[in-house]
Image (spheres, rainbow, N blue to C red):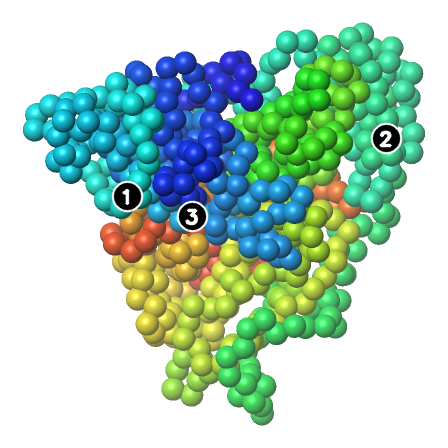
Amino acid sequence: MKLPEIDRRGLLIGGGAGVGLIVALAAWPRRVGSGLATGPKEAVLGPFIKIATSGRVTLASPQAETGQGTWTGLAQIVADELGAKWEQMAVEPAPSSPLYANRLIDVAGLKPWTVRRTRARLRVTAGSTSIRAFEAPLRAAAAGARALLIAAAAAHWGVPAGECDTADGAVTHEGKILPFGGLAAAAAERDPAQVVARGPGKLAGQDLPRLDLPPKSDGSLRFAADVRLPGMVFSSLRMAPPGGRLTGSSEGAARRVSGVRDVVVTDAWLAVIGETWSAAERALVAAEPRFAGPSNADSIHLAKLMAAALDGGDAETVFARGDYEQVVAGSRPLTASYSIAPAQHLGLEPLCATARFSGDRLEVWAPTQAPEFARAAAAEAASLPLGSVTLYPMPIGSGSGRALEADAVPIAVTLAKRAGRAVQLTIPHNSGVNHDAVRPPLLARLAALPAPGGGLSAWSARIVTEPGLEGVLAGLAGTRRPAADVTAAIIPYGVPTIRIERVAVELPIRTGYLRGGFEGMASFLTESFIDELARAQGAEPLAFRIGLLGGNVRLARVVMAAATIGGWDGGSSGGGMGLACASAFGSHIGLLAQAHVGADQRIVVDRLVAAVDCGRAINPALVRQQIEGGLLAALDTATAAAPVFVSGMPRARPLRSMGLMSLGETPKIEIELIPSKDEPGGVSGLASTVLAGAVANALASAGRRLRALPFDVVA
């Protein structure tokens, strides 16, 4: 089914795109086929590349654009390998197909890359995987398309294909030029062949402009709430707490509101369909829905469950090197306990989805980082075969990770089925916050034994938490919820004896994935405790780290660079400087922070200096943007007030009341990229790994050691 023109215009971005490819071009088209929608002047050169007679190259992106620059980064890889002109690139989300699997994402309990409910491979944007997962496949795709174009041009000229090349959107041969647009139709008719990618060229490593910025700036980029279809109606709703139910409402009062089309009541939610969204929302206010939820699912009960698990829960050793008990026998290791409260996503985009039935087919428009899961949820809600459902993944207005779970999709489908017409469901901000799948809380008890000659002889971590990304994916796939993956707590330092223990806990709240994942929490524990150990032994914190890093040259280099650029003062008492470093997502980062506690008892971060080694940077400007944005997002998460839970739901609060930074409070940020020829690493979640630890260590240098997130100087 072709994408309707109204949506096609909204999703096409003139000026750039990203495309993902999981199979060699040699497998296309006769044995695989292409689901790409084409116009009358477009030719398909593989499952993921289209070229128009105008010369525009459109790339079907398997990864969602959440603001992290994925469309630009993936497009740059393809344009570089293909020899395309950057100004002629365009993007559209890839259609549903197993060809777009993210090979770095797996789900516990499933065969590799296969999901039973979706009957498709895993197409997920999360975990800072986009460039890492798709650079090689994209180069293979672009190389195959280049070979087809060259073959068509060589046949036209009657010259050997080996004498031709591509550059600036054309095939060249001894001064002759044939633009891609004039060759595309002939190239698409040729038999594909296995080719070898030529590797990074002149576009690789350039600060090319972001492709999504112009349409976002002028408002032409359509998000989910911008979808408009003929005869469409609008809906709003209220939902029961997790495990709760609707106990009462004034349905008659809702129906009397002008513009109301229908009121839909279930045990789990109450929705109103109206001619406008405001009419539906006014009717919901008039309905005064009342819900009941678990009475013991509040903040106090959550804290008690976590503490009980840390003190008396069954611990499972997930990593061990050496015999910890034997090494520490008869000694008194240094210990410290750390806590991390649940964290909300703080996104501005409301949860939204649009659904429309056309005979025995269903179409859904939704922002989603896991489109095949959202499509499966829509099919289940509609009681339709998966093949009868088309999902159009919309751009996402928040990079926090909330869009992994498309909560609005099945409800929108249910409402559209009842209404007999297209329905757009927009969940109001407060209701969205109430049902936020927060980052799981964490409690940890760390212990370490100093070595007689300096350094450390043993390290232990006992961690209580719930699963994050792995739990979300298992829930979407309908498989057993796994235990939390805490392997990121394995320290990068050269300690001969290490023990990492996990204690499972079941909490009466919804937990999910937040940008940075568990890596963002584990580093806070590690880097804070390393700093405490150094100071307890009278060691200089930077030298102490370098002495323990051993052969981890790349990590040692970034923390040294951050310290040097930032004018590290040795961690002197009262200096307000702190360091942290981490290896995550295939990348390495060091951070120096300067911070203090203000007269109003609020934490003030004055300066952040980051040094980053992410391997070959496809687009250095994107890396800097993601590090800077990640630092600011992590700083808000570390300093904003923790959510208060009532009946298993985080209480909705205005953003202005949460202590978020204002523009004038933004710290000075400096970023140094370390040149590298290693394979590209991920960066979208990288900054979150070091921010909290570096700020905690800076505050300790200023006189206040804080071991809880979010930071609370009053505690």
Residue 219: x, y in percent?
47, 17
Residue on which disc 1 sits: 195
Image depth: mark 3 or mark 1 in front: 1
The quadrant of the rendering that contains the C terminus is bottom right
Circle 3 packing at 10 Å, graded few (<14), some (14-19), many (20+), is many
Residue 612's place in the image compared with 525, above or below, is above
Tag 2's secondary structure?
Answer: loop
Task: Determine the CA span between mark 3 and mark 2.
Answer: 42 Å
Query: Which residue type does callout 1 highlight?
Result: Val
- Whether residue 606 appears in this view of the structure is no
Q: Which residue is drawn at the image coordinates 86% and 30% (left, top)? A: 266
Front-most of residues 327 and 230 = 230
Residue 699: x, y in percent?
48, 57
First in sequence: mark 3 or mark 1?
3
Q: Quadrant of residue 566?
A: bottom left
Residue on which disc 3 sits: 133
Query: Which residue type does callout 2 highlight?
Result: Thr
Left or right of residue 261: residue 64: left
Front-most of residues 79 and 566 = 79
Left or right of residue 465: residue 588: left
Circle 2 packing at 10 Å, graded few (<14), some (14-19), many (20+), is few
Image depth: mark 1 or mark 2 in front: 1
Q: Determine which of the numbered discs, if any, sits on residue 266 in the image.
A: 2
Residue 497: x, y in percent?
49, 81
First in sequence: mark 3 or mark 2?
3
Farthest left residue?
A: 174
Tag 3's secondary structure?
Answer: helix
Task: Determine the CA span between mark 1 and mark 2.
Answer: 56 Å
First in sequence: mark 1 or mark 2?
1
Tag 1's secondary structure?
Answer: loop
